[in-house]
Image: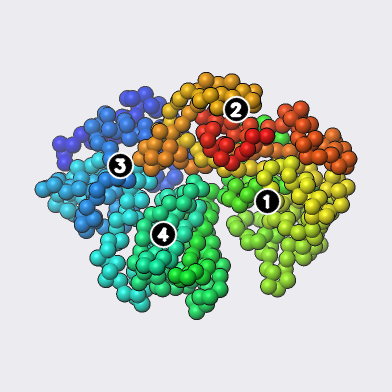
């Protein structure tokens, strides 16, 4: 081991001109406790994980591997404890005679290498892999071999506890928004929704179904004996040092109860508006609107378009000691410090409209109504906005303009809508190009035409070619695209004169409002997403 060239990561990166001494000092000042320098540099945006791997590969001659397709021998898991593997982000992948190859997130972690050589008696050959790749492999290969599962007895809780922990850890490692546990005729399929797309990750023997379902129900305080009706519950856990809220929904199917677990990442929700992918112009206009003392502000878009995140970001921005903020939600997704949150409870008659009426007697400055679903709620929300309150809410419409006829359809008096409505923001989520395999290409004729139609003139666009970091998809993570409709006097006049939506749209085009499609194309030009992704969620006007 002593013969090994023990070099420090910071020195290697400095020698290669990727980072300066001053930047390293700044990163070390802001990094979390016990966080390694490489992780902190990637998290703070100084380098990408791919750059880090390339430097180690080229200059320290450490090979990089993709575990996604590597034929890992599961018997090797016996050599390294799962806890040690998770803590140090490493996994044994191959053994040849006295040489044990270990994939490591930090192949310069000499403490871990020395420990493994002492513990296993092998010479350790470190190779490098991405953090997500290793964590996913740990979740996939530890404990879940068939022999282990076949020994599991249905009425024994231990395997179910371990498997559920593993399913949840994989969900966090994959940054999934939902986990689907689907009972089939002969087995159970576990699928994860990552960046909006469902992918199958593993199957579990049918004999574990009852124990697994019972384990989920016990944790979320649901009725174990009730298997014929859907149930909803929630669990708050710390998984891999991350606090997460899990929303549980069960549904009886012909092969047993299907379970969907929605992962609400608490570190993700408390984002400031400046961190929510707004273009600078939209952000400036939106911040101006929400600083007004009264009015109705609507956020629109389908389920899973990030409305809640924007809603909470807006509330957080306004959360001062001198204002009384009350929300009524169904359900309360995240608990916010210093804000009074009310949970809708239809079984005892606490509906949106009833709760909203009670809130008005609590002397609020700012009210957030989770969703406007009926005429009564719409009317109270609008009247509240007219009596000096700032009201936030959401609607399920495809565009910002479509919110206007939706309110009229609810039979709310048009003059009330016109007087109360301050702004409508529509948003969608699009997949973000993977930073590690991002490359440029020339535009197709269709793309050129589309960009020209939207007064944009560029020669090339970015795309992800696919790498280990993004599981060959070319995308990693998601960003939002927005359109903000601020209701000015001219729009109010058009609304009062019962103008058609196309007339209002024509006026908005004249005022150069940026629609969803244009905001998406603006983010294509910036190299954040692709034309395909934008067209998937936003249609041409």
Total count of labels:
4
Residue 337 can be seen in this image: yes
Q: Residue at x 59, y 24 (%)?
A: 449
Pointer 2 or 1: first along the chain: 1
Of badges 1 and 3, the one in the foreground is 1
* Quadrant in the picture for residue 475: top left
Determine the image quadrant of residue 52. top left
Which of the two discs, 2 and 1, sits closer to the camera? 2
User: In the shown orientation, is residue 248 left or right of residue 96?
Assistant: right
Mark 2 lies on residue:
450
Residue picked out by circle 4: 190
x then y, percent, for residue 221: 52, 72
* Label 4, residues with CA under 10 Å away: few <14, some 14-19, many ≥20: some
Give the number of the disc on residue 396. Answer: 1
Label 2 Cα crowd, 10 Å radius (few <14 / some 14-19 / many 20+): some
Which residue is at 36% across, 60% downward? 203
Q: Are marks 4 and 3 in contact (CB under 8 Å)?
A: no
- First of labels 1, 4 by sequence position: 4
């Amino acid at each position: 081991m002593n013969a090994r060239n023990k070099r420090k990561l910071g020195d290697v990166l400095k020698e290669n001109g990727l980072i300066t001494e001053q930047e390293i000092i700044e990163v070390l000042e802001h990094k979390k406790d016990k966080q390694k320098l490489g992780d902190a540099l990637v998290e703070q945006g100084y380098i990408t994980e791919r750059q880090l791997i390339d430097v180690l590969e080229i200059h320290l001659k450490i090979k990089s591997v993709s575990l996604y397709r590597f034929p890992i021998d599961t018997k090797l898991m016996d050599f390294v404890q799962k806890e040690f593997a998770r803590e140090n982000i490493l996994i044994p992948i191959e053994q040849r005679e006295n040489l044990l190859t270990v994939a490591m997130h930090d192949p310069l972690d000499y403490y871990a290498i020395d420990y493994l050589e002492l513990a296993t008696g092998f010479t350790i050959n470190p190779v490098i892999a991405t953090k997500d790749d290793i964590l996913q492999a740990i979740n996939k290969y530890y404990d879940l071999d068939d022999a282990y599962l076949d020994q599991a007895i249905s009425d024994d809780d231990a395997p179910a506890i371990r498997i559920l922990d593993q399913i949840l850890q994989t969900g966090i490692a994959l940054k999934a928004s939902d986990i689907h546990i689907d009972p089939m005729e002969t087995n159970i399929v576990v699928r994860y929704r990552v960046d909006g797309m469902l992918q199958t990750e593993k199957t579990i023997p049918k004999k574990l179904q009852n124990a697994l379902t019972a384990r989920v129900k016990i944790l979320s305080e649901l009725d174990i004996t009730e298997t014929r009706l859907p149930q909803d519950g929630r669990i708050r856990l710390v998984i891999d040092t991350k606090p997460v809220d899990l929303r549980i929904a069960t549904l009886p199917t012909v092969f047993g109860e299907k379970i969907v677990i929605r992962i609400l990442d608490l570190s993700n929700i408390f984002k400031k508006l400046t961190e929510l992918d707004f273009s600078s112009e939209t952000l400036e206009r939106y911040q101006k609107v929400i600083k007004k003392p009264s009015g109705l502000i609507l956020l629109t878009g389908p389920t899973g378009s990030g409305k809640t995140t924007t809603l909470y970001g807006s509330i957080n921005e306004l959360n001062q000691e001198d204002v009384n903020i009350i929300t009524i939600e169904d359900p309360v997704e995240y608990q916010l410090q210093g804000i009074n949150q009310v949970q809708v409870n239809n079984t005892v008659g606490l509906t949106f409209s009833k709760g909203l009426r009670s809130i008005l007697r609590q002397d609020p400055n700012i009210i957030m109504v989770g969703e406007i679903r009926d005429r009564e709620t719409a009317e109270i929300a609008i009247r509240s906005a007219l009596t000096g309150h700032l009201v936030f809410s959401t609607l399920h419409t495809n565009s910002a303009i479509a919110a206007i006829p939706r309110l009229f359809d609810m039979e709310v008096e048009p003059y009330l809508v016109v007087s109360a409505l301050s702004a409508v923001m529509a948003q969608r989520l699009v997949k973000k190009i993977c930073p590690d395999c991002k490359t440029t290409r020339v535009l197709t004729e269709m793309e050129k035409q589309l960009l020209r139609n939207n007064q944009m003139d560029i020669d090339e666009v970015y795309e992800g070619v696919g790498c280990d970091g993004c599981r060959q998809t070319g995308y990693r993570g998601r960003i939002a695209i927005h359109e903000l409709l601020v209701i000015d006097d001219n729009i109010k006049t058009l609304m009062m004169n019962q103008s058609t939506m196309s007339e209002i749209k024509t006026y908005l085009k004249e005022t150069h409002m940026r629609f969803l499609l244009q905001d998406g194309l603006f983010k294509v030009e910036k190299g954040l997403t692709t034309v395909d992704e934008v067209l998937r969620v936003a249609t041409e006007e």
